[in-house]
Image: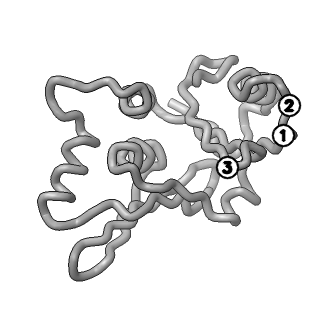
Amino acid sequence: MLDPSSNVPIVILRDLDRTLFLPIWIGIAEAQAIALRMEGVATPRPLTHDLLLQMCQRLGGSIEKIVISDLREGTFFAEIHLAPEETKRILDARPSDAIALALRAEAPIYVRRAVLDQAQVVATALDPVDDAERIRRVLEELNPNDPGRYTM
């Protein structure tokens, strides 16, 4: 979704119970890559994240999972956990790129508890209002200097 006050893209990670929402401000190109995959839009040529997944697979690896691993000085960090045939590897990545790759690989996305403890996590009770509207209301109330805020 877009930040209601700045129109900067935000990816919202949600737990399975739909009670915790983690907003991460991201770049426009990454938001487009994520949105294209979520909407099932096929592109005539592979995008960067498609290419990365193909390379990984053709080299005998797979994307095991993505972990939003850290939050330092307002910046989120992520790990791409690869499972090659012989040995597992972990790659450092921006969360937006990791998420775009996870969606293509149908890999799970996790957030470390320490990140949730520091981040601007939105905890809500279930109610009849739909998620997007509920999240939009909460985001409008956030301080622009809160952790995880994306700046250009």
Q: Secondary structure at mark 1?
A: loop
Residue at screen point 73% across, 23% down: 136
Q: Earlier in the sequence, mark 1 or mark 3?
A: 3
Q: Secondary structure at mark 2?
A: loop
The answer to which of 27 and 122 lies nearer the viewer is 122
Q: Which residue is mark 2?
A: 127
Amino acid found under the numbered disc labelled 2: Asp
* Crowding at mark 2 (Cα within 10 Å: few <14, some 14-19, many 20+): few
Measure the C-alpha gap from mark 2 to mark 3: 16 Å
* Crowding at mark 3 (Cα within 10 Å: few <14, some 14-19, many 20+): few
Q: Position of residue 14 (x, y in %)?
A: 65, 44
Residue at screen point 35% across, 47% down: 101
Q: Quadrant of residue 33?
A: top left
Amino acid found under the numbered disc labelled 1: Thr
Measure the C-alpha gap from mark 2 to mark 1: 9 Å
Position of the N terminus, as image quadrant, is top right
Contact? badges 2 and 1 (CB < 8 Å): yes
Q: Is residue 104 left or right of residue 119?
A: left
Contact? badges 2 and 3 (CB < 8 Å): no
Residue at screen point 82% across, 44% down: 123
Give me the disc on residue 124: 1
Q: Is residue 20 left or right of residue 43?
A: right
Q: Position of residue 109 (x, y in %)?
A: 51, 54
Measure the C-alpha gap from mark 1 to mark 3: 11 Å
Amino acid found under the numbered disc labelled 3: Asp
Q: Earlier in the sequence, mark 2 or mark 3?
A: 3
Of circles 2 and 1, the one toward us is: 2
Q: Which residue is mark 3?
A: 15
Q: Is residue 102 above or below residue 29?
A: below
- Its colouring scheme is one colour
